[in-house]
Image (tube, grey):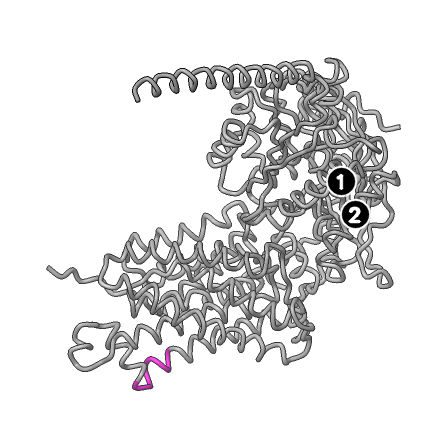
Amino acid sequence: MFDTTIKNRGAMTGRFKKTGLLAVAFAAAIGLGQALAGPADAAEGTFKIGMTAFLSGPAADAFGVPSMNGGKLMVDALNKGEVPGPYKGSVGIGGMKIEIVPVDEAGGAQVQIQRFRDLVQREKVDAVVGYDGSGNCLAVAPVAEELKALAIFSGCGTPRIFEEASYEYVFRAGAHSTMDNVALAHYVARKLPDAKTVAGFNQNYSWGQDSWRDFKLALDTFKPGMKVVDELFPEKGAGQYGAQISVLMRKKPDVVHSSLWGGDLEAFLLQAGPRGLFKKTNVVFAMAEHVLPRLAEKVPEGLMTGGRGAVGALHPDTPLANWFYKAYEERYGIPAVQAPFRFVQTILGLKTAVEKAMAANGGKKPTTEETAKAFEYATFEAPTGMIKMAIGGGHQAIQDNAIGISKWNAEKKRVELVDVEYFKAECINPPDGMKAVEWIEKGFPGAKCD
Amino acid sequence: MDVFLTILVDGTIYGAWLFLIAIGLTLVFGVMKILNVAHGALYAIGAYAAATLVGGNVIEEVAGFWALPLMLLGSILVAVILGPFLEKFVLRLFYGRDEVVLLLVTFGVSLILEDVIRMIWGVFSQYVAAPYSLFGNVEMGPLYYVGYDFFVVALAVLVGVATSLFLSRTIMGKIVLAVIHDAEISRAMGVNVSRVYLYTFTFGVFLAAVAGAFTSPMLAVTPSIGVNAIILSFAVVVIGGMGSIGGAAVGAALVGLSRATAINFWPEAELFVIYAVMAAVLLFRPQGLFGEPAQRRI
């Protein structure tokens, strides 16, 4: 019995040796195969993106959910190779299928820092795109540097991100808020040459105060001597603006500037319209375009507004823009506004940078550093037109802007912006290396407006 | 139009809105000693109920005077469904605990209700704009006011007077007052205090929903509209005295008028003046203008 056992053990050991050798050979073969296949395999792999947008909270309806919807639409189309224009026939990012991890931006800066770390360290994403809140961008940027992870912002109006610090891994693939108000001031100066008085009606936090400051300074250059008759700063989320409307109606400024957004903007329009404010004065909005499709016929006629870029119905007449605008409405049942237009710029910018880096490294999936280097000063086409990573050391985009006047089209049952004027990116954005406020205060040196 | 008359009108309209929200809050606190943080979410649900029945978001938009009874019906439905459910299955489990515990419980309920709103109605704004034009416009010098704003003032007066009369002139109201005064002795006298709590909380939910429904025509209805409203309502209730309906009316008027004054003369201080008034009142009367000093039992 023992002998048998021993023999059997010997036989077993021999069998194990054979099996082991086979396994090692098999593993080596696979390993060798993978090593040999290396560069070509990038086309068969995946590119994982963390997509961050407000899915809850006050900014969800105005910006967050439309952003995420636009992002998903673009990723689906890229994965199927259906995006037209310069991306025609190009699948995913550098041939890699895009995989997304959606994340809610609500909860404040500390929560976003934690979620960013989770995306990078636990989810192992290749890049994180999105963010609309300026506070969130300012908080996440240093963490992206610390983790050496790519962060590509879509919104975040503040110009401070790249004016007060320089980053290697952080980019913003859309223009900052300066051009909202510089373009608007250009437009107001041309359309209302006789205006002599102006009032501000902006929310009492950095966005509202900065917007009013930029508009006031810019208007002072285009129309020197405009008298400021009042500066109203209602709290964010106030919802009731009866007293402010009375003040504006009583003081009758020729122009009222406002950067209200979302539910606050809608409430103001609903309250001020029936009281006749828009018939007594010219109310101009920095970026009210996003409420036009939903408010529809409730939008007063004659509002001057844009949406940071040639966005929504103001999009340029290109195959890419026309496809995106149509595809979004078909999929979600409502026209795309500024947020999805801005959001997809991050994905297309990332795609451009990765593919540029792959072209330089022989087709391998690039490292984060290679992608970041390729992104600097890149130029790419988006549904809003050409995006140039021209300022902030090549990390901050500039783009064209458009302003128009609201008009209800009863036949099409939608609000249109008419009398639209397009402004070149180099006309309404500061040059590289100059702070936005300084640029406006000095009278726009280097602006190319011809 | 004289600037002071403008302040009076604007302050009254704003105060009426705040009072409509605060009255339910102060009633629930007076009877049940619960600072109901979920009141703001219930206010938002009232607005969503109006958006559903009147705003054309689910069924066809109702533009005529029928909108008003439909908005009231929506408020009743919210109260009948949510009031008993929250009181019986949530709050009742925590009676007898410290007031802070109940405050935290209602805070948790408010977060859950906000998510429920998102699940049912989504995150996009909804509108109930048609009733806003029901009463036309009122011309006052160089200014136009919307008639509906004055309807809201009238509604606030009606709700305040009706609730006060109910408490002082009806047997049920007197029972409620007895419970406010001393729940233990009321129980010893044969009052079914649990039932009083149930009815009071349900009525509080109804008042929150009425405030949401009837102010929704002047707002964009979003899941977070209750957040700001509830903070200001707390200020109103604290100024007037916790649990005092008359105090809430005076507090709302003070807040409305001081805010309108600030907007006209010192717009940067719009929010500051509200809390300055609250701090000044608390400095001299910690129990609020109409509140009674709390007796500590040893």
Upstream in sequence: badge 2 or badge 1: 1
At 25% across and 65% down in the image, what residue appears? B292
Residue A41 picture quarter: top right
Which residue corresponds to mark 2?
A: A327
Please say whether residue B237 is one of the residues in the magenta stretch: no
Residues B170 and A96: in front is A96
Q: Is residue A209 visible?
A: no
Q: CA distance from mark 2 to mark 1?
A: 10 Å
Residue A44 in picture, x, y percent from top left:
70, 27
The chain identifier of the residue carrying mark 2 reads: A
Residue B157 in picture, x, y percent from top left:
47, 75
Name the mark nearer the viewer: 2 or 1: 1
The chain identifier of the residue carrying mark 1 reads: A
Q: Secondary structure at mark 1?
A: helix
Q: Secondary structure at mark 2?
A: helix
**Residue at mark 2 shares a chain with residue at mark 1:** yes
Residue B39 in picture, x, y percent from top left:
42, 62
Disc 1 residue type (three-letter): Ala
Quadrant that contains the N terminus of chain A: top left
Q: Please give left or right for residue A447 compared with residue B24 in the image.
A: right
The kind of secondary structure the magenta stretch mainly shows is: helix
Which residue corresponds to mark 1?
A: A77
- Range of residues picked out in magenta: B164-171
Q: Please give left or right for residue A119 compared with residue B103 in the image.
A: right
Where A136 sits versus A146, above or below?
below
Residues A440 and A77: in front is A77
Where A260 sits versus B222, above or below?
above
**Labels 2 & 1 near each other (Cβ < 8 A):** yes
Quadrant that contains the C terminus of chain A: top right
